Image (tube, rainbow, N blue to C red):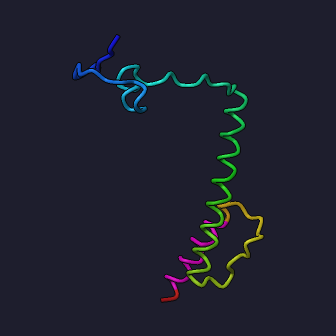
Amino acid sequence: MVKSCRSCKRPIDPDRDWIERFLVEGAPAPPESRATKADLRQAVAERDHLLGQLHAMALRMLAKELSIASSPSLSDNRTPSQIHADMQRWLQNHELSQ
């Protein structure tokens, strides 16, 4: 039996290439997800932790670029909000001194 394309109805050979198989059979079913809610919560927690570290590193790099005298080292244990508050204080002091 000759199969035909679902949209244009032309005869095709599904053994020729994957595009023609896709036209005849459609998209393959997605694989079953084996992730549990606990796995997803763990992944979200890891993502949030890494984003927090990235945010802190970005603030430290910005502080270094701005040549802030009290720029913390990269091993500083302050939270991103503490670093942000220190930067805000420095900017306010810098604006007042001008």
* Front residue of this view, candidates 5 and 95: 5
Query: Which region is colored magenta?
Result: 83-96
| Percent coordinates x, y for residue 5 in the rendering | 29, 21
Q: Quadrant of residue 83?
A: bottom right
Q: At which x and y percent is residue 28?
A: 48, 24
| Outermost residue to the top | 1
Q: Quick one: 37 or 92, which is closer to the camera?
A: 37
Position of residue 21 in the picture relative to residue 57 (left or right): left
Residue 7, given in percent of the width and then of the height, sits at: 25, 21
**Residue 19 place in picture, x, y as percent:** 38, 32
Instruction: Identify the residue at image location x=68%, y=58%.
Output: 53
Q: Residue 87 appears in which quarter of the rendering? A: bottom right
Residue that protrudes farthest toward the bottom in the picture: 98
Q: Is residue 38 above or below residue 75?
A: above
The one nearer the camera, 1 or 34, is: 1
In this picture, is 3 found above or below 78?
A: above
Task: Judge left or right: residue 4 versus residue 85.
Answer: left
Q: Does the magenta segment cover residue 89?
A: yes
Q: Quadrant of the N terminus?
A: top left
- At 73% from the left and 72% from the top, the residue drawn is 74
Between 17 and 68, the residue placed more toward the observer is 17
Q: Main secondary structure of the magenta part?
A: helix
Query: Magenta stretch: residue 82 in it?
Result: no
Task: Count how many numbered circles sit on residues in the image.
Answer: 0
**Residue ranking furthest to the front:** 1
Q: Residue at x 36, y 24 (%)?
A: 13
Q: Residue at x 60, y 76 (%)?
A: 63
